Structure formats: structure tokens, C-alpha cells
Amino acid sequence: MIRMENLTKRYGKNTALNNLTLHVKEGEFFGYLGPNGAGKTTTVKILTSLVKPTAGTATIGGHDITRSSLAAKKLIGVVPQAINLDMELTAWENLLIHGLLYRMKRGAIRAEARKWAAFVGLSGALDKPVNTFSGGMKRRLTIARALLHGPRVLFMDEPTVGLDASGRRDLWGLLKRINREGATIFLTTHYIEEAEALCDRVGILDRGRLIALDTPAALIASAGKIVVDVFEGDTLTSRFFPDRASAGAFAATVQGSATIRNANLEDVFVKLTGRRVVP
Amino acid sequence: MKGFAGVFTRELLIIKKRFLKMLISFSITPLLYLIAFGWGLGQRMTVEGVPYITFLIPGLIAMGSMTRSFAISSEINIARFYWRIFEEFQAAPVSDLAIAVGEVLGGILRGFLATAIICLFALLFRVRLHVNCVFLLAVLANAFTFSSLALITSMIVRSHADQSMLNNFVITPMAFLCGTVFSLKALPGWAHILIAWLPLSPATRAIRAAALGRPMPWGALVTVFCFGIVFFILGTYTIRSAKA
Ligand SMILES: Nc1ncnc2c1ncn2[C@@H]1O[C@H](COP(=O)(O)OP(=O)(O)OP(=O)(O)O)[C@@H](O)[C@H]1O
Ligand SMILES: [Mg+2]
């Protein structure tokens, strides 16, 4: 559904995206992880036609994003990382403009706007100006807007930032449902448990390069299923082991305090991107 | 092309929301001119065969429709870099042409709004204008041309500071020099030729001729439309090249 071939994006001397090749299947729930500045937003912006790639090609549903960009754009919905709502207008007016941009009929826009506003918990706020909204409400509105025209591919760049715990759980449920109904989802997130809970496959990006790509379970297995966290003074080190027996044997030799636990996707992320000391 | 409805609706809604504020701010400048120059000087002086205030009002219409149409430049700039609203248009399945049409129509509407206000002032100051199809066509040419120019600059200019530079060094001088508030005949020959090249000059001539019921200088009107078409094509093209 989404095919990126050798995508490269340079900003001056800075290479934001380096020769990225990645295929996301139809109906897949794809998680896109990486530390700050890895190039996640750049990828989403290229795929949604906001930024031109320096080199390489991409297609969405078989449509080349530069040569037949209108056909590609018809298929997609976007929740951008930076909120881009019209603050002077009401929520309903924002949705109306969106619907018109996607050639929807007014009646359909009204019906869909009601439906998605209810889904994201904004039913009572449709006629209020967006500049009176809280950060979380704005975020929910961008999500409703992205879904309004029934996109087959949904790009979400950190959609749960700024949502409270229950809002996030609600959104998870909603995304699962949309995905079950056939939409392909490309989700960028820093909440690794989110990717673990939702995604069929996860790609980890670091400094513009894809450094891992697999199912969450396989990634965890490849790093080592069991983790021993060792606290020595104020430094935390994690060691990975294939099973509990070897982990237990190691823990017994530790001077300070050690905890044994199951590995999660965060450990994989940390191990691969080197954000915490890993032996 | 059809996607322009979304872009234009956005501009309509914004105008609706700010309507009262716009009416007031669009009124201030022409009103000050009319009081200072129209009343102050207008009674005794005649220019090109009419009382100065009669000469001045069509000039103010040219000036007002130009500046208000051109003002969409900074609006689009803010929408682009501050609110990022432009991304919503760029990610939607609408062509660059549709975006251009929507934005330029919004600018034209502002130009006509400014014109309508000055026409009301004309009634107030008892100056009779010929508001007919030819007049509307001349205003349209002017508003279209400067909305299109605004589109180009909004896509090229990257900061608010550059935007106000542009206003100070291009738009404001043009607003004063192109025969809006004084007769170009008063200028020396070389200045006359220089200024005649600026698009507002033929626009002012066309608008004044129409408003005062004189024979329309069709050459001038066609010139304005030509400027407009060139600007519009360039504007549509700059939308494409505006991507990072
Ligand atoms: N418009 C731009 N001009 C110059 N450099 C840019 C621009 N946009 C992004 N970059 C650079 O490209 C790199 C990747 O940025 P990007 O926004 O894609 O990262 P990200 O993975 O989304 O990070 P985050 O987790 O912080 O959102 C960074 O080094 C950033 O500085
Ligand atoms: Mg980002």
C-alpha cells in the first residue's frame, strides 16, 4: 500500500532521511519509532506531499506521490505532528473546509462530522471556536478531521501527544477498529507501549536510516527475551538474556540490586539506538 | 479545479468572522484622505477638469482595492508559517491551480469590499460615481492583478519582516505614485514613463475613467488584465515550488 524506494531527503548538509526503502502492506498497522530528529516526520511529510524528496520514489496505493499526487492524496488522511487547525474558526467550520477540499457533499460532511466528533468526544464542542479548545481537544479534532473523508491510508505523526490517559486508550480502541475495517495505518510514536499494543510491524529509524524492521514479538526475541536491570550507584545498565535461567545466573553474581523482567519493545529501542548504556 | 471551493470557503469564513473589524479598518485610510485632502483641498482645487475630491475618490478606490487585495499576502504568509494551515491545502487532493483560484478569489472579494466602502463615502461626500459594469470590470482587473501578485510574494517571502519590507518599498510607494492622489500630468516626462510601467497606473486610469463616466481607455484595462494573468500563472507555479 505504501512503498518507499531509496528515499533520501537532505536539508543543506544535513541528511534527514538516508536511502530509505520500506513497504507497508495493505491493512497493516505499522509503527514508526525513532529518537528525536531521526527523520520520522520528514518521512510522513514526503508521503503526504508536503516535502519533496531529494532522491528516491514513493507510491501510495500504486500512485506515484509526485507524478500522480492527486490520486495518491485522495487515499490518505493525515494527523500532523504540529497542529494545523484554523484557530479563528469553529470545529465544525474546520471540518467543513476539510470535507470540501476532499470534494464531499455538504450533507455527507455534516453526517461524517457528527459521527467522528462523537467518536473523539467533541460532540458538544462542534460550534465552538478552536482557540477556546484545550490542547487535547485540538488534537482530537485533528484526528476527527483526518478520518472525515474515509481515508484508506492514515498517517498519524504522534497523534496521542497531549491526550490524557483515557483519551489515549479511547484512541487506541478507535485506531484498532479503523484498522480492522480495512484502513492501513502508519503511526509515528514515542510511546513504545503504544506501538507494542497496536502495531503488526514496527520499523525503527535512527539518523535517517532504518535500523530494525519486524513484528514487535520478533524484535523483542532478537534482543533477548529477558532483561536484568542492574543498579550500581546511580547508573542503570540492562543486560539481555535468551531465557530466565541464564538471567538468574547472571543476577546472582551482581553486587548491587538487580531486577529480572520480560523484555519489551522499549528495551529493543534502547539497545538499538543506544539511548541508554547497554553492555 | 473543483477543490477551490474548500480554499475559498475558508477565506469566506474568515472574512465573515472579521467582517466588522474589516469594515472599520478598511474605512479609516480612505476617510482620512477624504477629510484631509478632499475637504481640506478639494473644494477650491480642480484637477483634470473636475473638483479635486471627485478626482481623488476613484484614486482611493484604485489604492484601496490594490492594498486590500494585496494584503492576502501577509495573511497567507501567517497561515503558512505560523498556523501551518497551508499544509492542510497541500496535503489535500486539490491542484495548485485550485488553491490559487481560491486564494485569489478571496483577495478579489476583499478588494471589492474596500471599493464598496469608498463608494459609500462618495455618497456621503456628494460625489457622483458611475458604478456600472465597466467600473466593476476595472476594479476586478485591479483586484485580480494584486491578489495574484500577493500569491507570488506569499509563497516566496519567508518571514513577516520581509513581508513588511515589501509593503514599505513596493506597495506603499505604488499606492501614492500611480496617479491615485495626484495627476501624473504634473510629473516630468521621465518620471511619467517610469511610473506608467507600474501596474497600478493603468488600473487607476481605467477605474477613474469608468467612475467618472469618461470613455474607457481599453488599452489600459487590457494591460492590467495582462499583468494579472502573468502574475496568476506565476503564482500558481510558485505554490508548487514552495514545498520544502
Ligand atoms: N525544514 C527543515 N529544514 C532543515 N532541517 C530540517 C527541516 N525539517 C527537519 N529538519 C531536520 O531533519 C531531521 C529529521 O527531522 P524530523 O522532524 O523528521 O525528525 P523526527 O524523527 O520527526 O523527530 P521528533 O521525534 O522530534 O518529531 C532533523 O535533523 C531536523 O533538524
Ligand atoms: Mg517528528
Image (cartoon, rainbow, N blue to C red):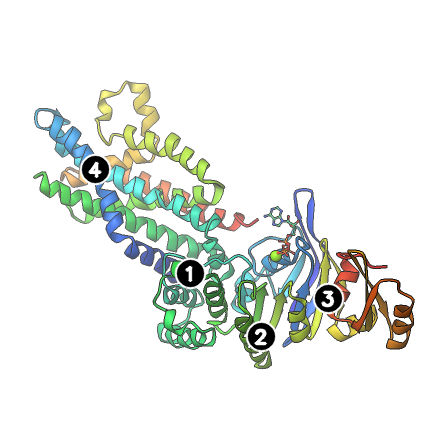
Q: Which mark is residue B1?
A: 1
Question: Which residue is painted at 37% across and 72% down in the image?
Answer: A124
Tag 1: Cα neighbours inside 10 Å, few (<14), some, or many (≥20)? few
Label 4 is placed on what type of residue? Pro
Task: Between label 2 and label 1, give the one nearer the viewer.
Answer: 2
Q: Say if labels 4 and 3 share a chain.
A: no
Q: Are marks 3 and 1 on the same chain?
A: no
Q: Residue tagged by mark 4?
A: B30
Which residue in the structure is indicated by mark 3?
A266
- Gap between marks 3 and 1, in whole Å? 47 Å
Toward which corner of the image does residue B65 lie, by quadrant? Answer: top left
Q: Tell me the mark number nearer the camera, choosing from 4 and 1.
A: 4
Callouts 4 and 2 in the same chain: no
Mark 2 within 8 Å of ligand 1, using the beta carbon: no
Q: Are marks 2 and 1 on the same chain?
A: no
Image side of residue A278 versus residue B11, left or right: right
Residue sitting at 29 percent across and 51 percent down? B109
The answer to whether mark 4 and mark 3 are in CB contact below 8 A is no
Measure how far apart labels 4 and 2 are at the Cα level: 56 Å
Question: Cα distance, mark 4 to mark 3?
Answer: 64 Å
Local secondary structure at mark 2 = helix
Amino acid residing under circle 3: Glu
Vertical position of residue B95 compared to residue B107: above or below = below
Label 2 resides on the chain identified as A
Res. A2 mark: none
- Tell me the chain of label 1: B
Q: Are the residues tagged 2 and 3 within 8 Å (C-beta)?
A: no
Check disc 2 and report the residue beneath it: A172
Decide which of A144, B142 is in the foreground and name it.
A144
Task: Say which chain tag 3 marks.
Answer: A
Frontmost residue, A189 versus B36: A189
Q: Is residue A107 visible?
A: yes
